[in-house]
Image: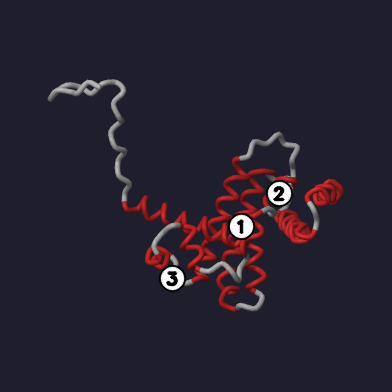
Amino acid sequence: MTENTPGQSPPDDADPPTAPRRTQAQRTAATRTRVLDAAIETLVELGYARTTTQEVNRRAGVSRGALLHHFPTREALLVAAVEHLVARRIAEILAQPRTGDEDLEILVGALRGPHFDAALELWVAARTDPALRAALIPLEASFADAIAAGSRELFGDRYTRAQIELTAELARGLAVSAILRDPDEDRALLDRLLPVWKDLLS
């Protein structure tokens, strides 16, 4: 390997210069995202009761002090995790390519899957946890607004807000009952019910 003399340009295959160091704000945002992603993963895999700050801390790979700096309580952590999940899911839905034929299937699909399972864990726990319930109420309101705004972008003025809200409630009910169905049965049920639902809304 040829060494460079002083003042000589490095060869073409030289290692690239070190990437610029991230700012404090970027490091803070990255840490927060790792913690929230770990909280969602834990909620989905272990459920609410076993989602401890220690387990989230372990999965996120950050110091306990860093976790507590961002989220001083377990309640604050889990509510923020679901809020993070909702925002990400809405963005993913709006980014999907569309042919115009999917119609309400997009909305129904948005309200099921692992992201729904994580939120469901908190909803069930909130029934007997007044502090958690109080923390979730404003999140639920912002989620309804996000669904309405996303639906306007997806469907224009094809449906009223009441129709979208009713569809969201139907989708949630289907997602809950899907816990006790295998995937093939669930798909068959959706194939039967969605055309009927679209006819009722037309």
Q: Amino acid at mark 3?
A: Pro
Location of mark 1 (residue): 145
- Mark in the foreground, 3 or 2: 3
Q: Earlier in the sequence, mark 3 or mark 2?
A: 3
Quote the CA–CA distance across marks 1 and 3.
27 Å
| Left or right relative to 57: residue 158 | right
- Mark in the foreground, 1 or 3: 3
Figure quadrant of residue 21 = top left
Q: What mark, if any, has residue 72 been given in the picture?
A: 3
Q: Amino acid at mark 1?
A: Asp
Location of mark 2 (residue): 109
Circle 2 SS class: helix
Residue 49: x %, y % from top left: 60, 71
The answer to which of 11 and 44 lies nearer the viewer is: 11
| Left or right relative to 153: residue 181 | right
Q: What mark, if any, has residue 199 been given in the picture?
A: none
The answer to which of 144 and 86 lies nearer the viewer is: 86
Residue 135: x %, y % from top left: 55, 71
Quote the CA–CA distance across marks 1 and 2.
18 Å
Residue 80: x %, y % from top left: 51, 63
Residue lying at the far left of the rendered structure: 6
Q: Amino acid at mark 2?
A: Gly
Please tell me whether residue 118 is drawn above or below residue 131 in the rendered image: above
Circle 3 SS class: loop
The answer to which of 24 and 198 lies nearer the viewer is: 24
Residue that appears at 56% across and 67% down: 51
Categorize mark 2 by other alpha carbons within 10 Å: few (<14), some (14-19), many (20+). Answer: few
